[in-house]
Image: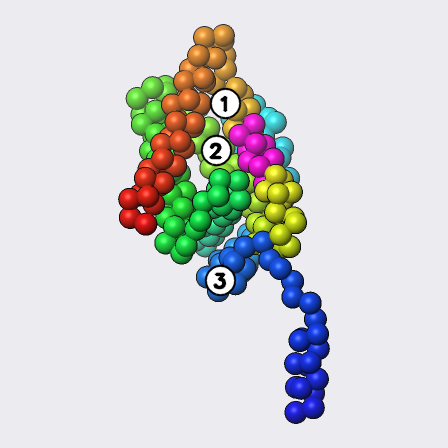
Amino acid sequence: MNLLSCQNTILQLMPEVKRITDFSQSSVVTLLLLVSFVVICLFWSYRPHYFQDVIKIIFVSGDKRVGVCGDSSVNSFILKLSVYFVAFVTVSGFFILFERHFCGVSFNASRCWLFFGAVPVWLLFKCLTFKIWDATLSSDKAMEIFQNAYLTLFVFFGMALYPLLLLAVYAPPAWMTVVLSLMCIIICLWAFCVILKLFQIFFKQMNDLFYIFLYLCGLEIIPILLLRKLVFFYLNLYN
């Protein structure tokens, strides 16, 4: 009893550490981050040179492929889904915190789940457009190579966001702007790598610049803006 009372006294004397958001008090957020950490550790043990391979492949043109997992076994498939889940958590977490901090949007549990669900919907849309493009317009394996690179970069930069997402949830409030700025830099690097792969795979002559521009506007920028518009339309309609 003396030890317990001493511990309570010490806890009462300790200054309370302020957090950036109330997300740090949520058991669901803690569980998602903990599961993501376990998945990243398992993936890293399964593919210890994955990050080095992706960094090399970003700057190499031609038919060079690095998939999320090295084989097509059941364990590899489950691990692949798991790392996509991690990327969904980190990317949706970034957008939630960004909208909350810079745009003043308030979030409850249902709004957070809506943002979390919007990210896989966006990725499924991307995969569908890749398949349609490959079936109707592409005569070689260029779109298949680009799709593989795109999904690999999504997972790669999604996992790169994880440590910053931890800071964004649990660090003191004074860190928030800096942490979100660093996350924006990672997102910009992701966009730069996607554009780089576009030029490496599809740019053969000057006319291809027009098609690359159409792709960036029609399949990257506009879908994201429309999805954001739909999400906020739903939030304003039902909340």
Magenta segment boundaries in residue numbering: 183-192
Q: Magenta-highlighted stretch: main secondary structure?
A: helix
Residue depicted at x 53% and y 44%: 101
Q: Can residue 79 be found in the magenta stretch?
A: no
Q: Nearer the viewer, residue 229 or 164?
A: 229
Q: Amino acid at mark 2?
A: Tyr
Residue 28 drawn at (x, y percent): 46, 61
Query: In the drawing, what numbered circle is on residue 150?
Result: 2
Task: Tell me the element at label 2.
Answer: helix
Q: Nearer the viewer, residue 174 or 209?
A: 174
Residue 142 falls in image quadrant: top left
Quickly name the residue at label 1: 198
Left or right of residue 11, residue 199 in this image: left
Query: In the drawing, what numbered circle is on residue 26?
Result: 3
Q: Earlier in the sequence, mark 3 or mark 1?
A: 3
Q: Nearer the viewer, residue 135 or 150?
A: 150
